[in-house]
Amino acid sequence: MKKHMIIAEVVNQSRIAEDIYSMTLKAPEIAKEAVPGQFVSLFSRDASRLLPRPISLCEINPGKGTFRLVYRVVGAGTAEFSCLRSGEMITVMGPLGNGFTLDCHEPVLMGGGIGIPPMLELAKRLAAQGISKKQLHVILGYRDEAFMADDFHKVATVHITSDSGNVGRKGNVVDCAREENLRGDMIFACGPTPMLRAVKRYAYENDLPAQLSLEEHMACGIGACLACVCKTAEVDRHFKVNTRRVCKDGPVFFAEEVEL
């Protein structure tokens, strides 16, 4: 799949929770080729910030040539992006990485924190394949404040958990899966490493296949610098080591491929 470096237009942007922003960009070349699970890299206007910031694709609209990003402000780069307004331009590279494999009939999606946004386009694509809301379960795990839940309610049966218990039930996504006895025939998950480790264990205990989208700090975003490697079960054919590049070979891996 070809990746593009283009100047994209900001269609709209809004703050949807504390430090969480939703931004829609117009970039037909990227929107046409992108699939759920991939990401783009955004470049700062500040020359002192050489490295781009990777952000997962939340929604993709090939017809309009747009895609939506939902991200957390964590530093100077993302703070800069949060100030962009409609009509302004930003340099974007993408689509990057691989996507989810959608071969399933009763999926269970688990998203934790900023790992929630990439689950939305996945849920929409699965629904478009004919999977009903009753068959499509999404578990959303928050710290304290919920965001994007209404988007998921349109296409899936939604379960909400939070660390504090202020929204949904108290606990994490795996706690919810156990309590609701959710298994299905494929687990999809994105979130922090401790969560993915627990999801992998849950999948193993229930003899279920699982696809995990890893969150790693990245530098180049295209597989050249080896800054975002993860440990794998098998030896990489190219580098002859038990590692894979999250940006290039991932971010999506089947659970048995990676060691967390």
Image (spheres, grey):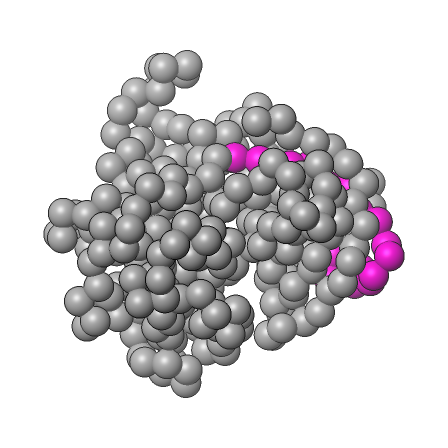
Q: In which quadrant is the N terminus drawn?
A: top right
> Hey, which quadrant is residue 177 in on the image?
bottom left
Depth order, front residue of 211/52: 211
The answer to whether 141 is drawn above or below residue 208 in the figure is: below
Residue range of the region highlighted in magenta in the rendering: 79-97
Q: In which quadrant is the C terminus drawn?
A: top left
Depth order, front residue of 137/260: 137
Residue that appears at 41% across and 50% down: 129
Depth order, front residue of 78/117: 117
* Residue most extreme to the bottom: 166
- Residue 87 among magenta residues: yes
> Hey, which quadrant is residue 130 in on the image?
bottom left
One can see residue 2 in this view: yes
Give left or right: position of 217 versus 132.
right
Residue 5, position as x, y percentages in the image:
73, 33
Residue 131, position as x, y percentages in the image:
36, 56
Residue 54, position as x, y percentages in the image:
60, 45
Residue that appears at 64% across and 39% down: 32
The answer to whether 57 is drawn above or below residue 223 in the figure is: below
Give left or right: position of 46 versus 97.
right
